[in-house]
Amino acid sequence: MIKLCVFDLDGTIANTLTTIAYYANNTLKYYGLPEIPEERYKRLVGDGAATLVHRMLSEVGCDDGEIFRKVYNKYVYDYDEDFMYLTSVYDGIVELLDRLKTVGVRSAVLTNKPEFTAKKVVDILVGDRIEMCLGNAEGRPKKPDPAGLFEILNRCGISGSECLYIGDTSTDMMTGNRGKCHTVGVLWGFRDRRELKENNAEFIIEKPSEILDIIENFNK
């Protein structure tokens, strides 16, 4: 029986690609570095801000310690100053979360986004429809390490077999599988079907409402 849905944030609940590209490219431009096409950020994101900045700098051929610290600090600061700029919730997510509440399935978020920003984004986009939001924070390893997922499961008193882990990247599928959860890959986010399939997504869906069908089949 499914009792809990744990969602990734960027590319799953929140459409943040344009926001990320905007702040990342503004930061690169500030330091005299070339900008990166927005579509390319779909392949650069997903593993936290520090990894994103390393990938950005590698992309433009300038990844050394000194410039990394400057770019990282400015990117994170500017993003948090106006974190909702150009960000929106994906169609169907709010309705899905409302329906999950109605059928008694709890909802949480696990993201590699800095936790202080992630909690604010979740609160604005979906409010108390999400019971718990864990992000990148000191002492908690980033996904695909399942530590954050285990923390959510333990707090909720729920086993992995009673949980759907829902995300849009290989990192998400690895996280869910390592947490012994049922993994659901979504196609409205940043990556494609091939990546999700190659990383052992148990289900691959095209729209949020399909999550309800998966739960219904488990909970018959």
Image (spheres, rainbow, N blue to C red):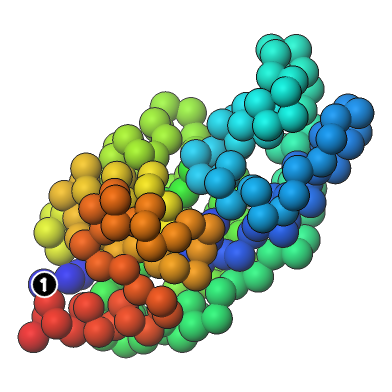
Question: Looking at the image, is 122 positioned above or below residue 28?
Answer: below
Work out whether residue 130 or residue 196 is closer to the camera in this orientation and state it. 196
In the picture, measured across the screen, residue 3 lies left or right of residue 12, that is: left
**Crowdedness near tag 1: few (<14), some (14–19) or many (≥20) residues, C-alpha within 10 Å:** few
State the image coordinates of residue 23 (x, y, percent, origin top left): 78, 46
State the image coordinates of residue 141 (x, y, percent, origin top left): 39, 31
In the picture, measured across the screen, residue 199 lies left or right of residue 64, that is: left
In the picture, measured across the screen, residue 70 lies left or right of residue 109, that is: right
| Residue 103 visible at all | yes
| Residue 165 visible at all | no
Q: What element carries label 1?
A: loop
State the image coordinates of residue 56 (x, y, percent, origin top left): 68, 34
Question: Looking at the image, is 52 positioned above or below residue 103?
Answer: above
Question: Looking at the image, is 108 positioned above or below residue 80?
Answer: below
Count of marks overlaid on the render? 1
Q: In which quarter of the image is the C terminus?
A: bottom left
Name the residue at 69% across, 19% down. Answer: 63
Residue picked out by circle 1:
1
Name the residue at 61% across, 36% down. Answer: 52
Name the residue at 44% across, 60% down. Answer: 192
* The quadrant where residue 215 appears: bottom left
Work out whether residue 19 or residue 82 is closer to the camera in this orientation and state it. 19
Q: Quadrant of the N terminus?
A: bottom left
Work out whether residue 211 or residue 154 is closer to the camera in this orientation and state it. 211
Name the residue at 42% across, 79% down. Answer: 207
What's under tag 1, amino acid-wise?
Answer: Met
Question: Looking at the image, is 195 positioned above or below residue 123?
Answer: above
* Extreme residue in the top direction: 65
